[in-house]
Amino acid sequence: MAAAVNQDLYQATLAAGATLKMRGKALLAEGTPDAIFEACVYFHEAARAQRTAVDALAPCPPVTRLASLAEVCWCLIEGRDPPRAMQSWGEVLRARAEVDEATTDAILSRVTERFDAMKIAWAKAIAASHAIQSIGARGAMDAIPASERTKAREEVRVLLESYPGSASFWWMSYRLAEADGDKKGAWDSLRRARRLEPHNPRFAAMSLLVASWALTPSAAEKELAGVRPTIAGAEAEVCLMYALAELAVARRESSGAKIRWLRARDAVNAGISRAATDSSYRNLRAVQLLVDDLLAGREPKIDILYVAGLTEAAVAAKPTSNVVDLLTLRARRGELGEAA
Amino acid sequence: MGRLTSDRQALFASPFASTLIETIAPVIAWVPRKKPQQPFRFGVTHTTTGKTTQVDIDLVWDIAKLSRRKPDVVAHAQRLAAGQSAAREHVTELAAYGLAFVAISALMPGRRVVHMSFGVAPDMLFDVTPGALRGVEVAGRTTGGPSALAVVRDGTPARRGKKAAQGKHAQLLARVDIAEAHLALWCAEPRIGIMEQVK
């Protein structure tokens, strides 16, 4: 009985993936940059559907696993995402060990050719991107000289023209734009990263905070309203960013601050119970203390950072800094340690 | 020689209609080349259970009816026909899938496509039972006729500096996880096709 149900789920999920791939292929045939990006979104979704289908089969025969992983890899190549395609290629190579050589060669014949061509083109593109390589290992983008950031942004733009399905490069594009104070560029890049990988908690969480900074308060409210019903069960990182976003929007609006503070408090309380790391707990604790002060009618002071254990941030901050602005800026720039 | 006329509207009764619909504009863009008059006749070499026959498949469509299902189908086909060369390979692929849908409905009545796999053969699957797949491998060539389709089917021998390429026929035979496989190969100029049961 269970096997029959699994087979039904397997078949239904595969069929859903097929529709996504055909839509993606049709968009590639259109050939415009917008259509190609939309195609990438479809192919990424198809790759996830293919994985879900195989997970429904337990146990999954080795030859079926190999063929499915090859299809996942193909979807990511067609979805113009070399970093993810290379990750999935590793899985393909692990899976091939359990399948006879003739079948393996026949299964992989199509994807191997495409993968090899993509790998060569990608290596060439990265080798030509000197500024990206230079900033790659560094953390804070705002610490990079503006001229170097400009070069890196141009290189990222060129790379994304050829590989618009690479969520990691849309993320880099977001971080560079944010450091330049380019709100539209930052929001557009992050939105694209999120469309390619909607289940990535980092992208989902950061989108909330960036919405509160880059969009008008009413547009930001739409973003926040979309996730509000899910906050009680959301990951700690999403709770933190949601709370900070509510506080940031409250600062920009002329009225209605108290209801946003209350929502921020609820989100932080939910997140603290699920904080998996010390860093995550400390950031949530700081926001909790901050909201307590706001609700009690007190002006939050830098001292709450010491109390929460964010000593490094407290030492670096000017005593007159607004604590909401300070925390949201740190969060937006990915300076929250393990929490972001 | 038999002659079959396929009415593409009838195919929309298929449960895979949402997939089929993506092939309409590519077929309209790709098929009518030098003689853009309906019916578009494909001379198909059909091989099944070891027996080969020649069949003509006449492809006809009614733009007014198709437009009700896909309102911008004519403009879409025109965009695809005039598109950049980088996108043309996708138009060819989609058109070949569309022709394979037609050929399956005409030559393999009762068979139903339940899945499509683009990275691993066969492209169109009737049965996805692990270890016992049944389906059709599809390819399209814009020109080249029988010799172009033969290269797809049989591959190419090794040449100086270039490894031999295995054809689709041998690849399908090598697969232990495939219980039944067919080839559906199409050329737009001249309009010919191969529908062949490989195993």
Image: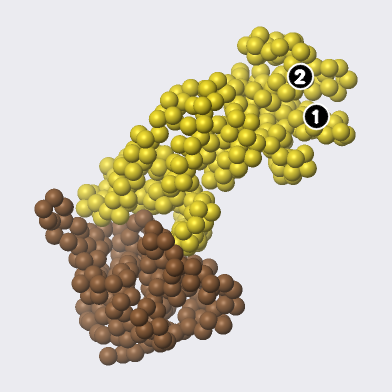
Chain colours: A yellow, B brown
The amino acid type found where label 1 is placed reads Arg
**For residue A175, above or below residue A68:** above
Q: CA distance from mark 1 to mark 2?
A: 11 Å
Q: Position of residue A338 (x, y in %)?
A: 57, 23
Residue bearing mark 1: A251
Give left or right: position of A175 versus B55: right
Instruction: For residue A97, say whether it is visible.
Output: yes
The one nearer the camera, A98 or A183, is A183
Taking A336 as reference, is A245 left or right?
right
Q: Tell me the crowding category of disc 1: few under 14, some 14 to 19, or many 20 or more residues within 10 angstroms, Cα based.
A: some
Image quadrant of residue B175?
bottom left
- Which residue is located at x 52 percent, y 75 percent? B74
Instruction: Name the quadrant of the C terminus of chain A.
Output: top right
The amino acid beneath tag 2 is Asn
Q: Which residue is mark 2?
A: A322
Name the chain under label 2: A
Q: Look at the numbered disc 1 and give the secondary structure of its residue.
A: helix
Cβ atoms under marks 1 and 2 closer than 8 Å: yes
